[in-house]
Amino acid sequence: MRARLVLFAWLVFAACSPGSAAAPTARDASVDATPARPFPGFDIYVTPANEPLVKSFFEFLPQVRVAILPTANPVQTAMLEPFSDNHVRVALDTDLACGECESITTERYDTPSGAWVYAAEGGNALGAQYALAELLEAFGFRFFHPWQSKIPATLADLQDFATPAGIDTPEMTLRGLHLHTLHPIEGYFTFWASNVVNGGGSPDAGTSGFGLDGAKRVIDWIVKNRGNYVEWSALQDIESYSNENLAAWQSHTSAILTYAHSRGIKVGIGVELFGESNLQNAFDLLDNENDPNAKASVDARYHLLLDGLPWDIVDLSFGEFSGTDPTVFLAGVNLAYAELQAVAPGTEMSATIHDGNYPNLEVTYDGKTMLYYFLVQYANPAIVPWLHTVMYFDLFQPADGAYDMPNFDQHRAYIEQRLMAGQPVGYYPESAYWIAFDDSVPTYLPLYIRSRWLDQSSLNAASAAGGYGQLEQSVLFSSGWEWGYWQTDYATLRMNWKTPNAWTDPVNDMFAPWGSVGAQLAKEIGALGELQNTYLIVDALAAYVAGQDEIVLLGALGNTPSQPDRVSFADYAAMSASDRQTFATKVLAPLAKLDSETTSIKVSIDALHLDPTDPWLTEVADGVAIDADRARFVHSLYEAVASFESSGTDGGWLARADAAFSDAGTVVARRDAALHYPNPSQLLGPGDNSTIYQSGYLTEAATLCYWTRERIEADEVIMNKTIAEPDCVP
């Protein structure tokens, strides 16, 4: 029964009972508002069965005083007991009949303080936690980052607060994050590496933010931001673990799964099918695609990974840049699914449809020519295809040659085809692409939020126009949370819950606790995202803002580009005068505009005089500053080469580039001293780990390696000599 009905029944009873206390009355919007109050404690009335949920919910909010009060009838007890003027009273229950839905209603108790009871309800454990998160957000909380939340100094006056939609139900059934632990990101150091006894950290580092504690923080963060799923990639190192380390890994992983399930979160593990395609130390099911004992090999790997560990989903992927014979591929995929059901019956399987417009990935099967990964559609129909896109490129605009793809039209078409047929399908986009592209450069890209919203809102519009169901599964491929990239994950999880009217809506809500200053800052972030869409996607300048390491360069030269390619300084200098003029019009002029317009946004943000001690405001300010520096630096180097070719001097452009480089170094140093993750050394420099990258994902950002490399490349052209340059390979 809805708590609102319980409230009503109790109100009638109390009003008709002789000698009863003054009955609570429904709050009317015209009743005088109480001002924002000093931060009080929270009294949470909850059934004994849900008491552990509330303890977990507040575990990583130590600043908040909470009394958890178990009772058989949370609402009635909350209304009957005498009020304390200094506490917020919440009745939490799971009595709605709608799964992960949530609702908040309020009643005012007639006391001099105008105390309130907030009835927070869900259809299950997750729904109740979502309701509690919504209530705290209405008071001014924001759950921004796994290791830090925004805690209000005073609580906002909610007046007669209620969930705007009455009962709020998620649009998607699967909403979550894939933590790409094949990269040395925060998730790697908490979900994977920290379980090893003699390397990578302690199996359980207590409350330090690492080990199980760190994984719990991430899961808690996903819950508070309306997600219901988390997965990470398995690495092949467990195949060679000692018995001691294997036991430590199993214990650590079991504890994570137990905790996630206790919070209502489903958990998945990512594996690769064939060792031949395994480029990043992933755990694969078959070392050799022609293994004569394939069934036994797959079983052995599954037992190692799954025994005693109740995974909900195994996410199967197929590597990058190389394929195999369609018949062999389909036999392997079907074997992987069949043996999964034999070893861990009922475990679901998803399969990644990746990208790559390379000749060796084009196959013909069933009379159709297609990208290799689309063969998944011919495998066991119980396998759910997840359509993957890369970087901030979306399903509806050009992809500028990312993975040599002109666009992702075929991925969009397959999603729509599955939806029209009423078949399950997932979308699997990215929130960062750290290798030489964004947060390792570094750049701050709210464009990611815009792209994820464009995907979702446009797919919804197509579904509505076509009269078929909307997308119900979306898992975001996450590659790091510094430099504002947590904003993408935060906003996307919420957009998966309910698609906003505009991509800036979650940004506006993000900064609402800062009042008018927050509103103006959100407006500038929105302007920056639109600017980036115009210049980086529409005008195809992505390659010039991104970095380029030696491997990326070799891939482009070998006709297997992983990211958009650009004209080198040497090739630019070798152009004819007319070609250089065309390049100046198509590239240099837009780069100059990107510089000036980003700088204008920076000036507007500077004029807000943001609190320099506020980590959330300064992170945005530093992000915009580095974006302006980046555009100015790259533009200036090309102009210097052009000036030298035409006049024999750099025309002062190198000094301008060096000034941008110097300012970028200052900004980076400021950010490196203020990272959210509690062990910056794991992210900022070299260190042994089980990935192929022996340094943290922010190492190149910390040293501005890509910038140094580009400065030397420009000098080589101008000075007509070879100069040693860093390869910037992580």
Image (tube, grey):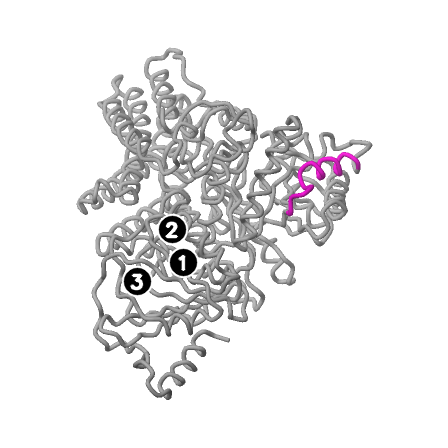
- Badges 2 and 1: C-beta atoms under 8 Å apart? yes
* N-term mark: 1 or 3: 3
Say which element carries label 3.
Answer: strand
Specify whether 346 is left or right of 620: right
The alpha-carbon separation of the residues under discs 2 and 3 comes to 21 Å
Circle 1: residue type:
Ala
The residue where tag 1 is placed is: 133
Q: Secondary structure at mark 1?
A: helix
> Callout 1: few (<14), some (14-19), or many (20+) C-alpha neighbours within 10 Å?
many
Kindly indicate the quadrant of the structure image that contains residue 255: top right
Q: Is residue 522 above or below residue 634?
A: below
Q: Earlier in the sequence, mark 2 or mark 3?
A: 3
Q: Amino acid at mark 3?
A: His
Foreground tag (2 vs 3):
3
Assess disc 2: are there few (<14), some (14-19) or many (≥20) residues with their C-alpha within 10 Å of its C-alpha: many
Q: Position of residue 469 (x, y in %)?
A: 57, 65
Crowd tier of the residue under label 3, counting other residues whose Cα lies within 10 Å: few below 14, some 14–19, many 20 or above: some
Across and down, in percent, residue 29 comes to 27, 76
Residue named by callout 3 = 87
Residue 274 located within the stretch drawn in magenta: no
Compare residues 618 and 647 and report the one nearer the observer. Answer: 618
| Nearest to N terminus: mark 2 or mark 1 | 1
Residue marked by disc 2: 143
Q: Which residues are magenta?
A: 296-310
Residue 100 left/right relative to 579: right
Mark 2 lies on a secondary structure that is strand
In which image quadrant can residue 706 be found? top left
Circle 2/circle 3 CB separation < 8 Å: no
Q: Is residue 298 on the magenta stretch?
A: yes
Give amino acid for label 2. Answer: Phe
Spatial CA distance of label 1 from label 3 is 17 Å
